[in-house]
Amino acid sequence: MTRLVVVGNGMAGARLVSEVRARDPHIRITVFGAETGRPYNRALLSNVLAGTMTPGQVRMLDAEWYADHAVTALPGVEVTAIDREAQEVLTACGRREPYDVLVLATGSEAVVPPLPGAERAVAFRTMGDCEAILAAAGTARRAVVVGGGLLGVEAARGLAGRGLPVTLLHLAGHLMERQLDAEAGLVLGESLAGLGVEIRTGVTVREILDDGVRLAAGTGTAPGTAGAAASPSGTGESGAGESGAVGEEVVEADLVVLACGVRPVTRLARDAGLAVARGIVVDDEMRTGDPSVFAIGECAEHDGVVYGLVAPAWEQAAVVADLVTATDKTARYRGSRLVTRLKARGVELAAMGETHLTEDEAEIVRFSHRARGAYRKLVIRDGRLVGAILLGETPAVGTVTRLFDHGGPLPADRAGLLFPGLAGGAAADSPVRMPDAARVCQCNNVTKGQIRSCWESGARDVAAVAAATRATTGCGSCRDAVEGIVGWLCEQEGIPV
Ligand SMILES: Cc1cc2nc3c(=O)[nH]c(=O)nc-3n(C[C@H](O)[C@H](O)[C@H](O)COP(=O)(O)OP(=O)(O)OC[C@H]3O[C@@H](n4cnc5c(N)ncnc54)[C@H](O)[C@@H]3O)c2cc1C
């Protein structure tokens, strides 16, 4: 009987285990997880931080599931080495586990910048981190979040939503610079400022103090709420300026959260002599140079890309499950088109593809209305949508995402795409008009057609659809769309919603 060993019980590892078991009841599965407790949906930690979900609600497989599915799960057990010759993994507690197939799903770890006092701050990556932040937030008077990427923005919004004054410090000139152009970053910053998050971009953090964060002299801007929490060095209540250089500032805070990016966890693979670039290098089968070792999720590098979202990790898990169980020997992973959606109450944002191309490189259609927190941009090349930013509430999200997904030719009326429903414009998104092939849940690749057939088989609410298709169980941002489709189908048949 094939012995499958999985290292890492995060979103990729846990999904792989359930995909393999769903295909093959016999294969022997052992999964090691360095974190204690049940696996959980990491993407939903932002919701736990914001208080819209409890830690229990984001947990996934439990002991009963493992027992019922004959899977040996070893939480809190770190794998420390791979002996490829003997085909065994070694654990921190001295266990040797033999394998026929090994899957590395070790994910990423938070980058902690080498700043003096960094140990006073908390990173934002694991459930443990989230619990530590929440415990500190209970008594904190002010918080600082360092890092204005997706996670930093979600953390800052979450803490502000709990009533804590928050300053978000970001090194780059605008927020989420990887996904957004400068104007979108500015509009996002203004929207967050309206929700109680002070934004300072272009700042360099020098040191984490007991009661704040010291910035390098003369750095930073604070659109809208300039400098409210910052005091010139030596004049702030913290007194931390005493040792600082003239002109340096201290942003006061008794809770400092670091959201400074992640790095793939590759040490095991590297030590075992497998090829590692930024991530563990794999081919289209998600196989490393050793045919019995695969890598999936954020630790893997496919075709030069390390993905940082759930959808690719779960697609990769499905491919490996097909191959390992021989359900589909032709299964291959060909890369993913990514759509990033922000989970921050009061701010709607979807960004996808190549958003930074200029007018010289692509056709750009843009609308900006800063006073309303709205910014929309389409990036078109050869008549196809290659990138988009949709900031602020808009019914265009579904249609634009679909056009990006499929890469098909765009209608001639570009502006109509940004303003669906306007005279002559494209139709507004609605369950009625959505084609069956439209992908509703990006994380789990679930189409409207699948939701419809699930409804036809008796599913009458989001929970039932989720149980049957897994739609809504990734980042959760498609929940409203699924609800809309179910409601519309019920309405058609006169069934009370
Ligand atoms: C706050 C937050 C919000 C996010 N929001 C979104 C979102 O909205 N949409 C989205 O698509 N993505 C989001 N992400 C990213 C998403 O969570 C990751 O892409 C996903 O978790 C990657 O899964 P993974 O299994 O590769 O890695 P992980 O989930 O990090 O799991 C890896 C696991 O392996 C374990 N491990 C590592 N080394 C060992 C070892 N030697 N032995 C045993 N175990 C080991 C780790 O402890 C960890 O539990 C978010 C992430 C965070 C932190």
Image (cartoon, rainbow, N blue to C red):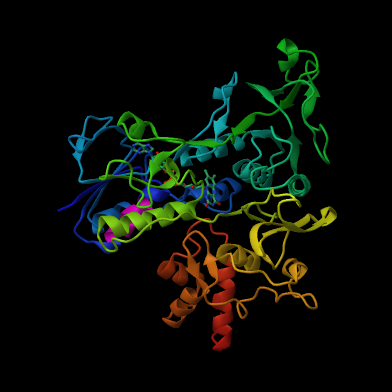
Q: Is residue 110 left or right of residue 30?
A: right
Tell me the residue at 69%/40% (across/down).
164
Can you name the residue that lies furthest to the bottom here?
494
Q: Position of residue 472 (x, y in %)?
A: 51, 63
Can you name the residue that lies furthest to the top here?
243
| Residue 18 lies in the magenta-colored region | yes
Q: Is residue 444 left or right of residue 358?
A: left
Q: Is residue 321 left or right of residue 463?
A: left
- Above-or-below relation of 281 to 69: above
Figure quadrant, ligand 1: top left
Of residues 3 and 294, the one nearer the viewer is 294
| Residue 214 lies in the magenta-colored region | no
Tell me the residue at 73%/58% (across/down).
363
Q: Is residue 261 left or right of residue 392?
A: left
Q: Position of residue 497 (x, y in %)?
A: 56, 79
Q: Position of residue 298 (x, y in %)?
A: 45, 44
Can you name the residue that lies furthest to the left here?
1
Of residues 128 and 312, the one nearer the viewer is 312
Of residues 207 and 240, the one nearer the viewer is 207
Residue 141 in sight: no
- The stretch of residues the image draws in magenta is 14-21
Quarter of the image for residue 385 reads bottom right
Q: Main secondary structure of the magenta part?
A: helix
Residue 128 in sight: yes
- Above-or-below relation of 475 to 82: below
- Above-or-below relation of 68 to 409: above
Number of numbered discs visible in the structure rendering:
0
- Above-or-below relation of 490 to 62: below
Quarter of the image for residue 402 reads bottom right
